[in-house]
Structures are given as C-alpha cells and as structure tokens.
Image (cartoon, rainbow, N blue to C red):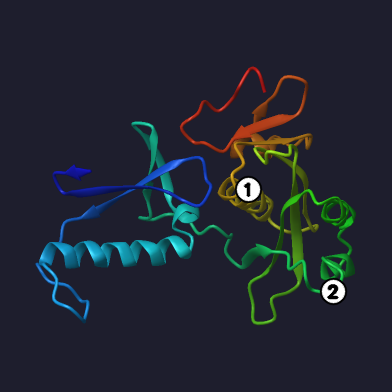
C-alpha cells in the first residue's frame, strides 16, 4: 500500500490471528545490493526489502515492535522499542527432549508438576523458562506454562507463572507476554487463566464471565468480551 513517504507492507505471521503492517521507506538510490542476473531498480529494491523483512521476522520483529492499531491491522514500529526480555535476563523455550523435561528447574526448587502433566496429556501449548543472561545461562529464575483448552486449538489456558524470590517482577511480566506471543503464533485466539494477579490486568487480561481472566490475541479486538 503506497503512502507519501513509503509503502506499507501488509502481511500475516505464522498462524497469528492478527494482520500486521510495517512501513518501508522508498529507496534513496535506484540500486540493488544483489548480485546475479540484472534486475530493474524497482525489482531489486523490492527483493532487498523482502529479504530484509524475512530476516527481521525470523529474529522476532513481531514480538519486539511497538504496536498501533490502524484500519483493522497492527502497525509495527521498532524505533525505541523495548527489549522483549528484561535487562540481565533471557527467556526461552524449555527443551522437552532433554531427558526429564525441566529437571534443571526442579533442581533449583521450582515446581514442574503442571507442565510435565500437560506433556503427558498431550495438551502443552507453551513452556518457557527465564534465566540470568550470562555466559553460563544460569541460574534459572522462573518459568511459565500454558495448555490447549480445546481440540481446535483456539483457546489456551495460562496454567503457571512463577519467578524465584528476589527476581524483578519485569521477568514475570515478560514470561506472560512471551507466552501470549508463542500461543498466538500457534493460532490461539484467546488466553484464559484462573491466576489471580493484578499484574495481569496491565498485560491486557480482563475479567471473564464465570470467573478468571481472559485476553484476546487479536489486537484489533476489544480488550474484554462479555461472553468470555
């Protein structure tokens, strides 16, 4: 979509229910950095943009960008966007094929009963762990787990969020945000939870009928749903 100072590239990402857009400025010089067969300046520029966006998307563009709702899509802006992980910490997926899943979390006193049960039931949607960002990648300081609520894989339940004593609350918030990102990219339309924590309201969760909290993963939808 053309705009006065560039174009909007509109796209879908994995199975995420949102439609995204990012603004790309027009080239300042009609040349391409590509080698190989000669292409027109416009074609070369478009190919460069496609390659650059593919690389950015593969390294978390959707997750790390600021978001503005515009005409039914989510406009992404990476300028001055905060890191997805709090300073000094890193968050990643629990490696399920590494012996007894989450054993390294259990060794430091974290309860892994729920995610292990979900694995056994075939319902685990996401299991993330947080650790200090250093050369050793430890100590581990928290984890979060979520499960599929329905066979259609449209609703996810946030079952567990835990950080160790003394760990900044920003780590807990990041665990929740990234869990929502993971399940949205897997196709979830809604995240529900029975976890009673005021901090979840600041992350977009709202009271749902019947108790608990709910969050829509489609950013263009209202923040709450009276039928949820």
Quadrant in the picture for the C terminus? top right
Quarter of the view holding residue 135: bottom right
Residue depicted at 79% across the width and 73% down the height: 98
Residue depicted at 20% across the width and 55% down the height: 25
Q: Is residue 83 left or right of residue 216?
A: left
The residue pinned by badge 1 equals 183
Q: Is residue 60 above or below residue 150?
A: below
| Residue 31 appears in the picture as rendered | yes
Residue 99 image offset from top left, x and y in percent: 84, 74
Badge 2, how many Cα within 10 Å: few under 14, some, many 20+?
Answer: few
Please tell me whether mark 2 sits on a helix, a strand or a loop. Answer: loop
Q: Is residue 3 left or right of residue 21?
A: left
The residue pinned by badge 2 equals 99
Q: Nearer the viewer, residue 52 or 179?
A: 52
Please tell me whether mark 1 sits on a helix, a strand or a loop. Answer: helix
Quadrant in the picture for the N terminus? top left
Residue 118 image offset from top left, x and y in percent: 83, 51
**If you read the primary sequence from the N terminus, does the residue marked by circle 2 or circle 1 appear first?**
2
């Amino acid at each position: 979509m053309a705009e006065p100072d560039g174009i909007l590239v509109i796209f879908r990402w994995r199975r995420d229910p949102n439609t995204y857009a990012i603004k790309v400025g027009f080239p300042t010089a009609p040349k391409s950095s590509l080698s190989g067969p000669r292409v027109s300046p416009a074609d070369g520029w478009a190919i460069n943009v496609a390659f650059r966006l593919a690389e950015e998307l593969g390294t978390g563009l959707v997750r790390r960008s600021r978001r503005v709702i515009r005409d039914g899509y989510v406009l992404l802006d990476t300028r001055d966007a905060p890191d997805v992980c709090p300073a000094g910490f890193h968050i990643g997926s629990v490696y399920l094929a590494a012996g007894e899943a989450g054993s390294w979390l259990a060794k430091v006193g974290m309860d892994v009963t729920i995610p292990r049960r979900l694995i056994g039931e075939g319902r685990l949607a996401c299991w993330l762990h947080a650790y200090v960002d250093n050369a050793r990648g430890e100590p581990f300081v928290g984890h979060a787990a979520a499960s599929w609520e329905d066979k259609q894989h449209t609703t996810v339940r946030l079952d567990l969020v835990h950080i160790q004593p003394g760990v900044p609350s920003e780590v807990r918030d990041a665990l929740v945000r990234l869990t929502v990102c993971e399940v949205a990219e897997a196709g979830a339309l809604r995240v529900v939870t029975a976890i009673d924590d005021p901090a979840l309201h600041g992350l977009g969760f709202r009271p749902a009928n019947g108790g608990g909290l709910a969050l829509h993963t489609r950013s263009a939808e209202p923040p709450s749903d009276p039928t949820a």
